[in-house]
Image (cartoon, rainbow, N blue to C red):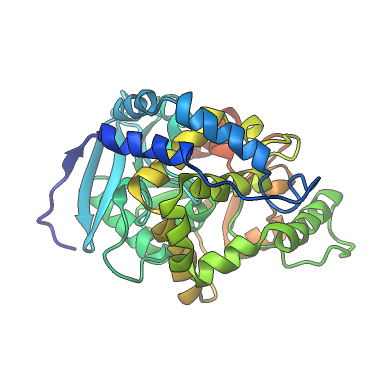
Amino acid sequence: MDDDFTLRPFRIEIPQAALDDLRERLVRTRWPSETEGQGWGRGVPVGYLKELAAYWADGYDWRAWESRLNAHPQFTTEIDGQDIHFLHVRSENADALPLILTHGWPGSVVEFLELIEPLARDFHLVIPSIPGFGFSGPPRGAGWNSQRIARAWAELMRRLGYERYGAQGGDFGGGISRALGLIAPQNVVAVHVNGGTTYPSAAEDDVTLTERERARVRRMHEFMAEAGGYLAIQSTRPQTLAYGLTDSPVGQLSWIVDKIRDMTDPAKELPHEAVDRDLLLTDVTLYWLTGTAGSSAALYYEDAQAWSEPEVSSVPTAVALFTVQDIALRRDEEKANNVVRWSDFERGGHFAAMEAPDLLVDDVRAFFTDYR
């Protein structure tokens, strides 16, 4: 790619008028009716969301979280015609291994806030916002699927002067990290994914499955039957969805909260019990302030349009699963990847960086020890 590039320092400075507009919209929300006694069975209950929206309007402090984000060096650069926003936190250990961390949906760079300080003791951290998400903003054109994003990440690491590095991610971030290993195997020393990169290929009644594996297959079928509608919508009609979520902060809040509850630790009944309430609202606020509801959803569309049978990766790979909310099976992961480490945790869920950062940090640190 072009060697004539610029890394531009970036600082988050949201105008007060945008925050005032957010509060006004929250206060003026037009609330829907609901079926008596429905609980969470038909989606997010009105009572729960009213309480959360009221706190978002009058209790939550964006400026405090803005300052927390701004405590870390941030930059933007243009790659393949697209602005890319990223955090770049260098370790005090000059010889530390560079590590690129990639979020998923409905996440953002906010996912990694609890990981930055402990991981920076051992790694130079690069934490980009996926095109269509956060301060990378909406893509300027079509075609930004996971493979293209991985190519952009390879270029980003080259621009930063990193010739040898690791990759970590969950959800879309796991797939992008895997794709980065396929695109730049001479540079990526190892890949760590939480949640896996495949869907179970076995049936629940397969006698060769362990009880834990059967529970994961069962969970996959339950999830697709009860909560998988968002996949169909975002894979086919992200633009139609965008109008409601971009115009209504409560619409954006409910869409994200619904998925957080569906995929977090099953031992936690409510979303804010699995993910800190203010951290959750910071993630939602970032979507709202950047107007990226539709462009982030479009990653599902782009990947659906570009789908092909994935290559087998030879890059050393670690897979960490958190409770039955991570539905991958070891046999499938080992067919697709060079799995050299397998971790299975009894706490946490699909959003491990926000739910169980301590477990994730320890697993990442332990895995990459042999590749530093």
Q: Position of residue 170 (x, y in %)?
A: 53, 48
Q: Position of residue 48 (x, y in %)?
A: 65, 37
**Picture quarter containing residue 302?**
bottom left
**Picture quarter containing residue 94?**
top left
Task: Please say if 38 is above or below 299.
Answer: above
Q: Residue furthest left?
A: 4
Please tell me which residue lies in front, 207 or 356.
Answer: 356
Instruction: Identify which residue is drawn at 58% across, 39% down.
Output: 352
Q: Quadrant of the C terminus?
A: top left
Please tell me which residue lies in front, 89 or 93.
Answer: 89
Whether residue 366 is visible here, answered yes or no, is no
Instruction: Identify which residue is drawn at 71% across, 50% down.
Output: 34
Count the marks: how many? 0
Instruction: Identify which residue is drawn at 44% across, 31% down.
Output: 113
Instruction: Identify which residue is drawn at 59% across, 44% down.
Output: 257
Query: In this image, 207 relative to 92: left or right?
Result: right
**Picture quarter containing residue 88?**
top left
Query: In this image, 177 relative to 90: left or right?
Result: right
Task: Please say if 355 is above or below 208.
Answer: above
Q: Quadrant of the N terminus?
A: bottom left
Whether residue 10 is visible here, answered yes or no, is yes
